[in-house]
Image: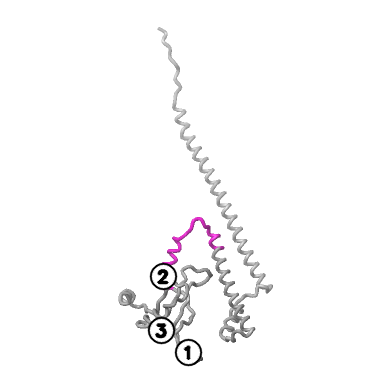
């Protein structure tokens, strides 16, 4: 199977394997050892085909040797590693075209946008809760301080805009007013154009009726009235 895959996808590299989980299984270590014939350190991706939480439904693992403090033999186990889902440009274009055709007519555009925003807010809330739990554990001494994580959190907080500033509120208000002004002007122009087309249509219909009446008038004048003749014999 690997040889057939290499014939079709020469540039792609085999890095591991996956299964539909949704969690690690007892035989995953044995299967992972088989894949070491083709990859030095294969990556196991567990895909949750029925996700219940918002976010990426995948978890990636690599096998490591765990050394015990009691002097017993080391055992192999899986260690979680960070992962992300990406695609090449051609794949992204193909997925976008497929999503355009997959459309539920019963769901409007506004409902779809609100549903997507709700999912995004749920995902953001889930991540904020995880950050809060981590910071509480650090403060209580349950977890050691990780400088890299603290720096990342500080960068996230620095990117949050200060919406309480008076200048920023004024800028948002001006932007909103400009948008509403454009909508008002566009609506007025559309109404004026519609009324203009309606007036032109009425004028054209009236001119057509007058032209038809004028064309029928000479035909009526050429017709001579006939008098009835009586037989006197």
Left or right: residue 173 compared with residue 104: right
Could you tell me what secondary structure mostly forms the magenta stretch?
helix
Mark 2 burial class by Cα count in 10 Å: few <14, some 14-19, many 20+: few
The residue at the far top in this view is: 233
Q: Which is more foreground, mark 3 or mark 2?
A: 3
Q: Which mark identifies residue 41?
A: 3
Q: Find the residue positioned furthest to the right.
A: 166
Q: List x then y, in percent, for residue 24.
A: 46, 76
Q: CA distance from mark 1 to mark 2?
A: 42 Å
Q: Which residue is mark 1?
A: 67
Q: Read off the residue under disc 2.
A: 91
Decide if residue 101 is on the left or right side of residue 151.
left
Q: Nearer the viewer, residue 86 or 162?
A: 86
Q: Quadrant of the N terminus?
A: bottom left
Q: Judging from the image, what secondary structure is the residue with disc 1 in?
A: loop
Q: Nearer the viewer, residue 20 or 95?
A: 20
Q: Report whether 41 appears left or right of 82.
A: left
Q: Secondary structure at mark 3?
A: loop
Residue in the foreground of this view, choosing between 34 and 216: 34
Q: Earlier in the sequence, mark 3 or mark 2?
A: 3
């Amino acid at each position: 199977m690997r040889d057939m895959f290499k014939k079709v996808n020469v540039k792609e590299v085999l890095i591991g394997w996956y299964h539909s989980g949704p969690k690690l299984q007892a035989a995953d270590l044995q299967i992972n050892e088989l894949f070491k014939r083709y990859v030095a350190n294969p990556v196991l991706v567990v895909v949750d085909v029925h996700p219940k939480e918002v976010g990426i439904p995948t978890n990636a693992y690599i096998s490591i040797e765990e050394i015990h403090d009691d002097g017993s033999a080391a055992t192999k186990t899986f260690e979680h590693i960070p992962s992300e889902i990406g695609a090449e440009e051609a794949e992204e274009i193909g997925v976008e075209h497929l999503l355009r055709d997959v459309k539920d007519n019963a769901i409007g555009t506004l409902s779809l946008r609100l549903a997507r925003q709700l999912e995004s807010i749920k995902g953001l809330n889930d991540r904020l809760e995880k950050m809060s739990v981590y910071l509480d554990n650090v403060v209580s001494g349950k977890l050691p301080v990780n400088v890299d994580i603290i720096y990342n959190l500080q960068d996230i907080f620095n990117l949050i805009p200060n919406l309480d500033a008076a200048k920023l509120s004024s800028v948002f208000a001006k932007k909103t007013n400009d948008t509403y002004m454009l909508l008002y002007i566009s609506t007025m122009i559309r109404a004026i154009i519609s009324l203009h087309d309606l007036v032109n249509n009425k004028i054209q219909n009236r001119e057509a009726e007058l032209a038809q009446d004028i064309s029928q008038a000479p035909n009526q004048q050429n017709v001579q009235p006939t008098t009835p003749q009586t037989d006197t014999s």
